[in-house]
Every structure is written in structure tokens, then in C-alpha cells.
Image: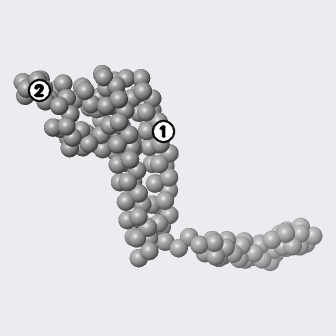
Amino acid sequence: MSEYIDFVKLELTIVLLTHLMACIWILIGESEENGWVMSFILAQRAATGDLTISKNEFAIEIYANAFYFILTTITTVGYGDISGTTTFELLFSMCVEFVGLTFFSFLTGTISVMFSGDQSFESLINARMEQLDLWLLRLENCNKEEKIPNRLYHSIKEFI
């Protein structure tokens, strides 16, 4: 049951980090005159024919687009329908891609460990001991007809 709680915590962390990066993406887009936010507003003005539309009227849509952009970039999907247009936006996009690559690798490993069952140190030692017992049994069977010189046999057994 604890691995499911850990999984939910992980998912909530992903949502929180995506939200924070989406807010940064919006700030970057608003800080430059020809940023992605202004491109979005200009597209809305062209689509509706209303030249008085401001970014405040589309705050939810801007946030949804930012969240979508960050999420698709972090998960390495990156559809390309939203992208940076300024140098600062492109630099931030590259940072998000790097974070996404690192995070995706970490996430894959974490989820596989969560649901793979008992991977404690003790279980790994027990598995190795079973393999060692099998080796000793093979060694004993191999030496029944004294196929291995006695000195070599004892050296191997001592080493194992």
C-alpha cells in the first residue's frame, strides 16, 4: 500500500513542478514584447476580430497553454504547437527539456522500483546465496569423478 502512496506523492510533485515552471514560462512570455503570450493574444485578436482583447481576458487560456507546453516538454512528447520565439524563451525551453530528460529518467526508474516488489538488500543477498549454493553443488558434482585436480578443487572451494 505504501508504494501507491509514494506514487501519489510523486504525481503531486510532478503537478506542482509543472505548475511552477508554467508560471515561470508565463512570466518570461509576458516580459518581452514579442514573446509567446503576445503572439497568443494577437492570434486571439485575429480570430475574433476584436482588437481590444487583452491578456487578462485570456488568463485561464494562457495558463492552460503554459501548463500544456511544460507538461509536453517534460514528458519528452513536445508536439511543437507552442514554442518560444525570443532568445530568453528558447533558453528556458532548453532548460525545461534538460530537466524533462533528467526527470523522465528518474521517474521511470522510481516507478519501476516502486512496483517491482521486494528489492531490499536482504532479498538481494538471499538471491546471491542461492546462486552460490548452486555453484557449490555443481562443483561437488563435477568433482565426484575427480575431473578437477584436488588442489584446484580445494582452492575453488576455499575462494567461494
How far from the left and from the top, in percent, is residue 89?
A: 39, 29
Circle 1 crowding by C-alpha within 10 Å: few under 14, some 14–19, many from 20 = some
Please tell me whether residue 149 is drawn above or below residue 69 in the rendered image: below
Q: Is residue 130 left or right of residue 12?
A: right
Question: Looking at the image, which residue is at 69% across and 75% down?
Answer: 129
Question: Looking at the image, which residue is at 67% across and 73% down?
Answer: 125
Instruction: Judge by depth and name the residue closer to the eye, 20 or 51.
Output: 51
Could you say whether the residue bearing mark 2 is in a helix, strand or loop? Answer: loop
Q: Amino acid at mark 2?
A: Thr
Q: Which label belongs to residue 52? A: 2
Q: Is residue 113 left or right of residue 52?
A: right
| Quarter of the figure that contains the N terminus | bottom left
Question: Looking at the image, which residue is at 20% across and 44% down?
Answer: 60
Q: Quadrant of residue 61?
A: top left
How far from the left and from the top, in percent, is residue 156?
A: 84, 69
Separation of marks 2 and 1 at Cα, in angstroms: 38 Å
Please tell me whether residue 29 is drawn above or below residue 125 in the rendered image: above
Label located before the other in sequence (2 or 1): 2
Numbered disc total: 2
Q: Which label belongs to residue 69? A: none
Circle 2 crowding by C-alpha within 10 Å: few under 14, some 14–19, many from 20 = few
How far from the left and from the top, in percent, is residue 81?
A: 26, 31
> Can residue 19 be seen in this snapshot?
yes
Q: Is residue 36 left or right of residue 108?
A: left
Residue underneath mark 1: 98
Could you say whether the residue bearing mark 1 is in a helix, strand or loop? Answer: helix
| Quarter of the figure that contains the C terminus | bottom right
Question: Looking at the image, which residue is at 42% across and 27% down?
Answer: 88
Residue furthest to the left in view is 49
Q: Quadrant of residue 28?
A: top left
Q: Amino acid at mark 1?
A: Phe
How far from the left and from the top, in percent, is residue 143?
A: 81, 74
